[in-house]
Image (cartoon, grey):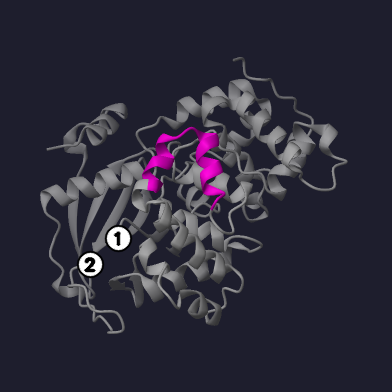
Amino acid sequence: MILPVVDNFRKRFFYSSSAYHIKLLQSSATSAMTYTLPCPEQELQLRFTLNGGQSFRWKETKENEWTGVFSNRVWKLRRNNDSLEYDVYKCTKPKVSKGKKQKSDNSSSKPFTKAEVTENEKLLIDYFRLDTSLKELYDNWSNADPVFKEAAEKFYGIRILKQDPVENIFSFICSTNNHISRISSMVEKLCTSYGEKICDLDGVSYFSFPPVEALAVEGVEENLRKLGFGYRAKYIHQSAMKIIEFGGNSWLDNLTKMSYKDAKVELMKLTGIGAKVADCISLMSLGHLESVPVDTHVFQIASQLYLPHLKSAKTVTTKIYDEIGDHFRLLYGNEAGWAHTILFCADLKMFQDKGMKREKITDKKSKRRKT
């Protein structure tokens, strides 16, 4: 049975069910199924989406091939014209007690059942929010803002990932005063130390992100300090204990049902989470797409292109932070955080050679969105 979200996604791109296909690829390591999902590149650009600071578990393992982990599976993604090809690997070994090494033998992996194939596709669609038309959003934002319109010409297909809240929370606790490569290293250390092994693939061991309970046990802070987490070790351990105290998964689920502002207040009760990190979590895992994280890059964009009176500001005060967020919410509407992410990617130096220079858009003026 095709799940409604999957069926609706296919219909939106005018693909019949016969356009969706599966083929078996044999390799020396494992038997892997490759699946194809209709998805034009204008609707999903892998590099900017996966390498733009949202998730820290994706790597370009080959040219035009990205490997990462979510939902306790390892995924390989490739662009093939107007389709997205993907391989999925799951854990097929029984769980072992902590402290024992788990051997991996992917050659004995069982193929996915039909139900699992459908579930995998749904997971991918949900993760990339592919049931939302990006063209419609880009058109709306471009009509509201000529600055965005110019950025969109090069920075197309950028999506907000729908991540697991636990992974998102602890990944962004690691992000404080840090850079992407070191954040990625810390996240992997969390997974290898406290997660479950999924498989060995191309000489690399992949682990699931640990449950919050695993990060709340005694000794976690001490161990993480030994692994180089510094003061973040305390933040991680204390936040894990607080999440359990607040209600665990029920508390996390309630955050998605609250208003954006209420959810942000709740998140800031956790150790080591300030306004920006709370906004990142609200945007990337709680479904509050109006959330606008304001860091140095976003402040520079706002002061140079939208709010010139802020150029003289030496620090981003709470008042300035809120003013920037409110400006983008008024300009872009309910998905302001998504739109601002495109501007954020356009500002990153690592993407400049593939996109535009900021100087080209400094003389543009934006229109405010009518409410």
In this figure, which residue is indicated by the disc labeled 1? 72
- The residue segment tinted magenta is 251-269
- Residue at 51% of width from left, 71% of height from top? 185
- Quadrant in the rendering for residue 4: top left
Q: Is residue 30 above or below residue 13?
A: below
Q: Is residue 7 above or below residue 189?
A: above
Q: Position of residue 140 (x, y in %)?
A: 54, 22
Helix, strand or loop status at disc 2: loop
Q: 75 or 216, which lies in front?
A: 216
- Residue at 55% of width from left, 69% of height from top? 234
Amino acid type, mark 2: Cys
- Residue at 34% of width from left, 65% of height from top? 208
Helix, strand or loop status at disc 1: loop
Q: Are marks 2 and 1 in contact (CB under 8 Å)?
A: yes
Q: Position of residue 171 (x, y in %)?
A: 50, 60
Q: Earlier in the sequence, mark 2 or mark 1?
A: 1
Q: Position of residue 93 (x, y in %)?
A: 18, 72
Does residue 56 appear in this view? no
In this figure, which residue is indicated by the disc labeled 2? 91
Q: CA distance from mark 2 to mark 1?
A: 8 Å
Q: Position of residue 316 (x, y in %)?
A: 76, 45
Magenta stretch mostly in which secondary structure?
helix
Q: 322 or 348, which lies in front?
A: 322
Instruction: Classify mark 2: residues with Cα within 10 Å, few (<14), some (14-19) or many (20+).
Output: many
Amino acid type, mark 1: Asn
Q: Is residue 63 left or right of residue 22?
A: right
Q: Is residue 254 magenta?
A: yes
How many numbered dots are placed on residues in this image?
2
- Considering the image in quadrants, where does the C terminus appear? top right
